[in-house]
Image: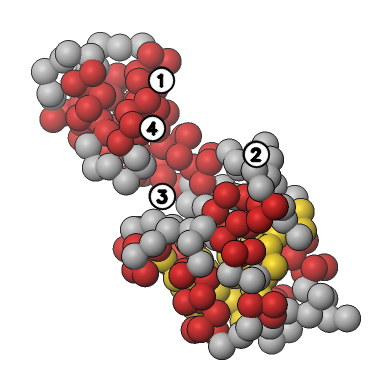
Amino acid sequence: MKFKAVFFDVDNTLYDSTLQVAMARQNAVRAMIEAGLPREEEEALKALEGIVQKHGSNYPNHLNRLIEKFNLPEDPHWIAAGVVAYHNTKTGYLTPYADTVPTLIALRDRGIKLGVITDGVPVKQWEKLIRLGLHHFFDAVVISGSVGIEKPAVKPFEEALARTKVKPKEALMVGDRLDKDVEGAHAAGLYAAQIVQGKHSDKKPANTLQEPDYLISRLRDVLSITENP
């Protein structure tokens, strides 16, 4: 299939966000315990995961709620230790997959336009792209927080198409989530490839819109999909 544009999700598509987040939370809990939090690591980590699930990943006070859950007085030392460990680990693990940059270069050299369609807070998602060293590759970056609605709504996909000036059937969406990336792409008329990695890799299609046109195990497989006929 000859595509004029390829759009990518960010987390678990361009880099391993599942590993990054898991290590960041684990190290945050360890640092809090080393600073004096009187709990075992496994217990504290399980509680933190529950708090994240309840409040969402962008909630700013996970560690405060963790201390509160254990009916302990809030200690700024514990919180600061956790915050520093979390952010240091998160930055350390914010590196592209080994084949991300070579794949983007090869696609660009073929004259294919590149874009990002991702959910999240605009500043945070841009920070990821900049820290990953990938932001210069993209002709369009569409973030749900900027367009007012998350995938699988068609608006983020239509915005990316408009910015790159390509038609839906000339574009491929690559992402790890069937319910967000694949369904949204199909609803907007694009082709879709699921990259089977990260925490959503075991999910099965819940409807026909979630059935990917292509299944890939690593990003460089996009090159064979986009080869000119």
Image x and y of residue 67, in percent = 21, 21
The amino acid on which the numbered mark 3 sits, given as a three-letter code, is Thr
The amino acid on which the numbered mark 4 sits, given as a three-letter code, is Gln
CB-based contact (under 8 Å), mark 3 and mark 2 = no
For label 1, the SS is helix
Image x and y of residue 32, in percent = 28, 24
In screen coordinates, is 19 left or right of 54?
right
Disc number for residue 95: none
Label 4: few (<14), some or many (≥20) within 10 Å? few
The amino acid on which the numbered mark 1 sits, given as a three-letter code, is Lys
Image x and y of residue 116, in percent = 52, 69
Disc number for residue 91: 3
- At x 36%, y 42%, the residue is 57
Image x and y of residue 228, in percent = 83, 81
Q: Which sits earlier in the primary sequence, circle 1 or circle 4?
A: 1
Task: Tell which tag, 1 or 4, sits nearer the viewer.
Answer: 4
As measured in the structure, the alpha-carbon distance from the residue carrying label 4 to the one carrying label 2 is: 18 Å
- At x 13%, y 30%, the residue is 76
- At x 59%, y 76%, the residue is 114
- Quadrant position of the N terminus in the picture: bottom right
As measured in the structure, the alpha-carbon distance from the residue carrying label 1 to the one carrying label 4 is: 11 Å
Q: Which residue is mark 2?
A: 203
Q: Which sits earlier in the primary sequence, circle 3 or circle 2?
A: 3
Disc number for residue 46: 1
Label 1: few (<14), some or many (≥20) within 10 Å? few
Q: Which sits earlier in the primary sequence, circle 1 or circle 2?
A: 1
As measured in the structure, the alpha-carbon distance from the residue carrying label 3 to the one carrying label 4 is: 22 Å
Q: Which residue is mark 4?
A: 53
The amino acid on which the numbered mark 2 sits, given as a three-letter code, is Lys
